[in-house]
Amino acid sequence: MKKSLVTLTLAGLSILIVESASAQTSATQNVTLTVNTVYKISTSGNPSSMIVTTGTAGTDALSSVSDNSTTYSITQNYGNTVKLTANLDAALSAGYALQLNMASSKGTSAGTVDISNATSGSAVNVVTAVNRGADAGQMITYTFSALASAGMLSSTNKTVTFTLTN
């Protein structure tokens, strides 16, 4: 009887060893990856107050003032057809002008553009053909001018909206 017991125990050990040797040593999974369209823009802050204080005697155009203390950064992965537009929350009155120039290393700057009458329905292109990638720390230059014939302008705030669009 002892002999059968030993045989059964050895047979049981053989089965365990065989099962252990046939276990899988690897497994697989399917992973779905997606990158959605990304349009991101930020600015470094607000420009300083722009105050016209002088002009030349006998000339209606007063001396303009400029500010280039702010920058913008963009990231986009859509394609080469992306552009950057700008508009004001409300148009300026006649005789006052706000111009904007935005540098770019990823697109084509439109140069100095007048945004005085550009509102949400009539935004103007400021940078076109923006390539995929990032454009960081690009200079924004504002120029404000006025005609003496337009009179004084009380301190007013204008909101400039920049939009990345295709």
Image (cartoon, helix red, strand yellow):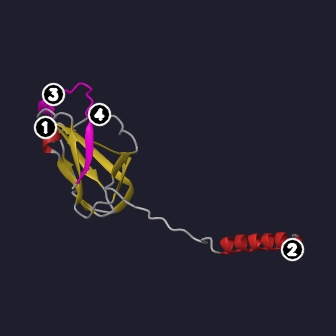
Q: Residue at x 32, y 49 (%)?
A: 140
Marking on residue 151: 3
Residue 75 drawn at (x, y percent): 36, 56
Q: Which residue occupies the extreme front position in the image?
A: 1
The amino acid type of the residue labelled 3 equals Gly
x, y (%) of residue 8?
Answer: 78, 70
Vertical order, 109 against 48 (above or below): below
Q: Where is mark 2, residue-wise?
A: 3
Q: Nearer the viewer, residue 68 or 128?
A: 128
Which residue corresponds to mark 4? 51
Quarter of the view holding residue 61:
top left
Marks 4 and 1, Cα distance to the nearest angstrom? 17 Å
The mark found on residue 60 in the picture is 1
Write the start and end of the magenta stretch as one range: 147-165
| Nearest to viewer (mark 1 / mark 2) | 2
Which comes sooner in the sequence, label 4 or label 3?
Answer: 4
Q: Residue at x 31, y 59 (%)?
A: 104
Q: Is residue 56 visible?
A: no
Label 2 and label 3: CA atoms lie apart by 118 Å
Nearer-the-camera pick, 132 or 101:
132
Residue at 29% x, 33% y: name it: 51
Three-letter residue code for mark 2 = Lys
Task: Report whether 164 appears left or right of 30.
Answer: left
Are the residues at dot 1 and dot 2 in contact (C-beta closer than 8 Å)?
no
**Cα separation between marks 1 and 3:** 10 Å
